[in-house]
Amino acid sequence: MSALAYRRVLLKLSGEALMGEEDYGIDPKVLDRLAREVIEAREAGAEIALVIGGGNIFRGAGLAAAGMDRVTGDQMGMLATVINALAMQDALEKLGAKCRVMSAIKINDVCEDYIRRRAVRHLEKGRITIFAAGTGNPFFTTDSGAALRAIEIGADLLLKATKVDGVYDKDPKKHADAVRFDALRYDEVIARDLQVMDTAAFALCRDAGLPLRIFDMAQPGVLLRILRGEPVGTLVHAG
């Protein structure tokens, strides 16, 4: 078995990734496939944390633009991420994995509160740990929440799963001549306004010196390949 290049990682999944071919909600087939990928990586020896967005259920920013109070909308979005986290926990546990959901907002009847030292202990014990409810604050995206949690737990790498195979200089779905980057510095990403994550998340990673790899999660076995050091997608680093 190949040695792992990264021992502890945080994987950021969008809520939309759980929809599959559905228009809304969660596709059980997609959930099962993602859970198997995560378990494969865990069984190879990695410590895996997850953050899952809530856009398949609710987008606070969208309703805020239509007139809803932004704080209320963001709080509803946080609850949507808890729903997705519980769904992923169920999928993982059905396949025999040990998993914990930790929420940034208090919701003790369904999951644990987020406590950094306890989260690290879960990872050390081999439990897949899912961080829900973002940072617990409005006006922050789950991308920022993922960056913050990755830094707090001392992750070796932050992984951002997307629908494209890395970062391009322009939208590859609209421009046939789009060029993919193998590697970029955080300052370059921010200066070019390459919006694959929000600027606050990039700045957090840059300041902490945390590398970020952006890749297409649809490729079977891709998570384990990355953990073994294969140059999949685009690596963003402090430089």
Image: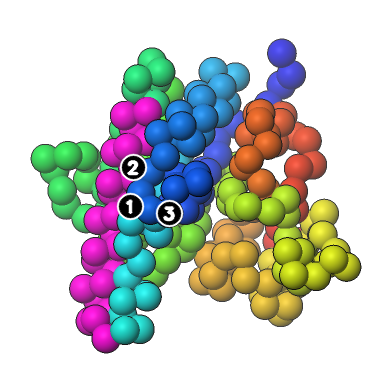
10 Å neighbourhood of mark 3: few (<14), some, or many (≥20)? few
Task: Between label 3 and label 1, give the one nearer the viewer.
Answer: 3
- Left or right, 14 with reference to 231: left
- CA–CA distance between discs 2 and 1? 6 Å
Q: Up-down: is 202 above or below 237?
A: below
Residue at x 51% of width, y 30% of height: 33
Residue denoted by label 1: 81
Residue 35 image offset from top left, x and y in percent: 47, 29
Give the magenta part as a residue range.
67-91
Q: Are marks 2 and 1 in contact (CB under 8 Å)?
A: yes
Mark 3, secondary structure of its residue: loop
Q: Amino acid at mark 3?
A: Asp
Quadrant housing residue 183: bottom right
Sooner in the amino-acid sequence: mark 3 or mark 2:
3
The numbered disc on residue 85 is 2
Which amino acid, mark 1? Thr
Q: What residue would you read off at disc 3?
A: 23
Given this view, does label 3 or label 2 mark the residue nearer the observer?
A: 3
Above or below, comparing residue 142 to residue 177 in the picture: above
- Give the residue displayed 82% in from the left and 59% down from the top: 180
How packed is label 1: few (under 14 Cα within 10 Å), some, or many (20 or more)? many
**Most distant residue in the left direction:** 109
- Mark 3 and mark 1 lie on one chain; the one further toward the N terminus is 3
Element assignment for label 2: helix
Q: Is residue 227 above or below residue 39?
A: below
Inspect the magenta stretch and tell me whether residue 193 lies in it: no
